[in-house]
Image: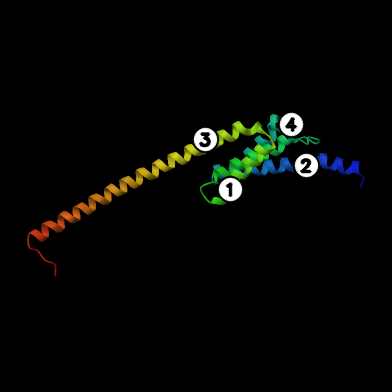
Amino acid sequence: MEWHDAESVTLFLWPFLLFAVALALVVAIARQMSDGAVTSQIGAAVLAMLAKPALIHFQPGAIDHHNAQIDLLLALILFTLQIERSAIKATLAGLAASLSLAIGLEMLPAIAAISVARSGAFYMAWRARRATSRSVRDGAGGIIARIRIGTASAAGAGVTCL
């Protein structure tokens, strides 16, 4: 195989492989967001294949940084959806964002929007947990107070347990 042939194969395969990765990530995101509904996964894949503005970056001969950034942004979205499951997912989300920014700053607004949205979700979950723990604490405090009052009144009446 000559140099020219290898370059021709690379010009075709590189965008094709990155497009396959993008489609796999879109399907994984759809699966995550729809709790595994097959129709949403198929619909997401079809819409991704028909998205003309993004498809120009995956055409044969398109050896460019934009297609890799699209894949990294999709990976960031997938890992961000799964971030509460493990520290590894959080690490991979940070790695995808860092690699995308190392390639180029074009995706900075999208990465910032994802970060702000995820921070808001963390804050809302924290507030919900705080409100739940507060109501549990108040409920438990009321039960403990009733037990103490009942114990004190029984002791004051001279009642003993056998």
Q: CA distance from mark 2 to mark 1?
A: 26 Å
Between discs 1 and 3, the one toward the N terminus = 1
What amino acid is labelled 2 in the image?
Answer: Trp
For the residue labelled by badge 4, is the local secondary structure a helix, a strand or a loop? helix
The answer to whether the residue labelled 4 contacts the one labelled 3, judged by CB atoms less than 8 Å apart, is no
Residue topped by disc 2: 14
The answer to whether the residue labelled 2 contacts the one labelled 1, judged by CB atoms less than 8 Å apart, is no
Neighbor class of circle 4 (other Cα within 10 Å; few <14, some 14-19, many 20+) is few
Q: Residue at x 15, y 54 (%)?
A: 149
Q: Residue at x 19, y 53 (%)?
A: 146
Quarter holding residue 40: top right
For the residue labelled by badge 3, is the local secondary structure a helix, a strand or a loop? helix
Between discs 3 and 2, the one toward the N terminus = 2
What amino acid is labelled 1 in the image?
Answer: Thr
Between discs 1 and 4, the one toward the N terminus = 4
How far from the left and from the top, in percent, is residue 75? 63, 43
Quarter of the picture containing the C terminus is bottom left
Residue at the far right: name it: 2
How far from the left and from the top, in percent, is residue 155? 11, 61
Q: Is residue 56 above or below residue 157?
A: above
For the residue labelled by badge 1, is the local secondary structure a helix, a strand or a loop? helix
Which circle marks residue 116 in the picture?
3
Q: Is residue 63 left or right of residue 85?
A: right
Residue topped by disc 4: 56
Q: Which tag is nearer the camera, tag 1 or tag 4?
A: 1
How far from the left and from the top, in percent, is residue 34? 54, 42
Neighbor class of circle 3 (other Cα within 10 Å; few <14, some 14-19, many 20+) is few
Residue topped by disc 1: 91
Q: CA distance from mark 1 to mark 3?
A: 17 Å
Neighbor class of circle 2 (other Cα within 10 Å; few <14, some 14-19, many 20+) is many
Residue at the far left: name it: 157
